[in-house]
Amino acid sequence: MENQTKVNVAVVGATGAVGQQMVSLLEERNFPIAQLKLLASGRSAGKTVRFKGQDITIEEAKPESFAGVDFALFSAGGAISKELVPHAVAHGAVVIDNTSAFRMEPDVPLVVPEVNMHAALQHKGIIANPNCSTIQMVAALKPLYDRYGIDRVIVSTYQAVSGAGASAIQELLTQSADVLAGKQPEAKILPVSKLPVHHQIAFNAIPQIDVFTDNGFTFEEMKMVNETKKIFGDDSIQVAATCVRIPVVSGHSESVYVELKEEYQLEDVKALLADAPGVVLVDSPEEQRYPLATDAVGKLDVFVGRVRRDLNHPRGLHMWIVSDNLLKGAAWNTVQIAEELLKARQ
């Protein structure tokens, strides 16, 4: 990207786990930056971050922070996005927002570049990044949707604690040490810090991510349902999700059952997945090779394996999908959208 016209970029939430990954990716990808603004809360203002051999001072994010900014990458929580994104757009910036604040707004594209980059080109100042679990699933489903169509998806997720922030990571590590030392672990954060009841995550699985809705599903589960339909532009797809937090630091895993509209040959499905952009097929049961969170961490791709026929439904298909939730599930998808927008300008 070094030959492109340089642009001014702001990262909002630069000190958070995803924000740090965004800054690292902008450097690694040699994104054509004229000026980089790193914005965060007042308590982080004044700290410095190293970028391309220079120290950049973090500034407090304010409405006036976006003057002259071409791209504003947001990952500071939904409340901050709702407050500051309109100001960024008013200053002429293209916002790529990693929160749920605008995802389901009718005029805001919800984009995974491998799936529906065309939607991003119709933006009106804001492009939304989908939920991490949705991103990796739809990236794997896209070639199957295009070839066979999809009637139904049932997904169970096994989500890393990094999706709940740095404090959740620390809680997992502290609890694990306590259990191994024979101490009673203390739970203060998971499944949802603002709720009165908290559960141990160490050596456990918690079948709740986010708060419950009136239909018995959690908001995390409903995000997967609604976002999948919006990204494909197809409300006819039936989607059901069960989202589970497990004691893994990074890397989300998913068991996905798909009912296609047409019958298929298994080898054709594997070939489609192997050729899909951003997808890596790791599927050799005889060698015990399949996607693992430990292998996916630090990589930009979505990994798919355990691809097999359902035993009862002629168009049913099972697969296992793994990806780094902080990269393809968040920071990389955001930077990737910005890269594709720049390419489209050429």
Image (tube, rainbow, N blue to C red):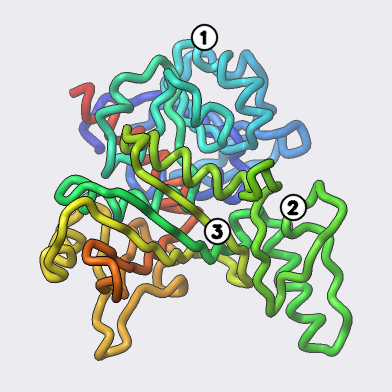
Question: With 93 as the anchor, is 162 left or right in this view?
Answer: right
Q: Is residue 134 above or below residue 129?
A: below
- Name the residue tied to disc 1: 90
Q: Dot 1 surroundings within 10 Å: few (below 14), some, or many (20 or more)? A: some
Q: Dot 2 surroundings within 10 Å: few (below 14), some, or many (20 or more)? A: some
- Name the residue tied to disc 3: 242
| Label 3 or label 1, whichever comes before in sequence order | 1
Q: Is residue 183 above or below residue 91?
A: below
Element class at badge 2: loop
Give the number of the disc on residue 192. 2
Element class at badge 3: strand
Amino acid tagged 1: Ala
Picture coordinates of residue 22, whole percent (x, y): 48, 44
Q: Quadrant of the N terminus?
A: top left
Picture coordinates of residue 262, whole percent (x, y): 16, 54
Q: Measure the C-alpha gap from mark 2 to mark 1.
A: 34 Å
Element class at badge 1: helix
Question: With 101 as the anchor, is 27 left or right in this view?
Answer: left
Based on the displayed image, in which of its 4 quarters is residue 305 positioned?
bottom left
Question: With 233 as the anchor, is 108 left or right in this view?
Answer: right
Q: Dot 3 surroundings within 10 Å: few (below 14), some, or many (20 or more)? A: many
Q: Residue at left 52%, top 37%? A: 98
Residue situated in front as seen by the camera: 264 or 334: 264
The residue mark sitting in front, 3 or 2, is 3
Amino acid tagged 3: Thr
| Label 2 or label 1, whichever comes before in sequence order | 1
Q: Are marks 3 and 1 in contact (CB under 8 Å)?
A: no
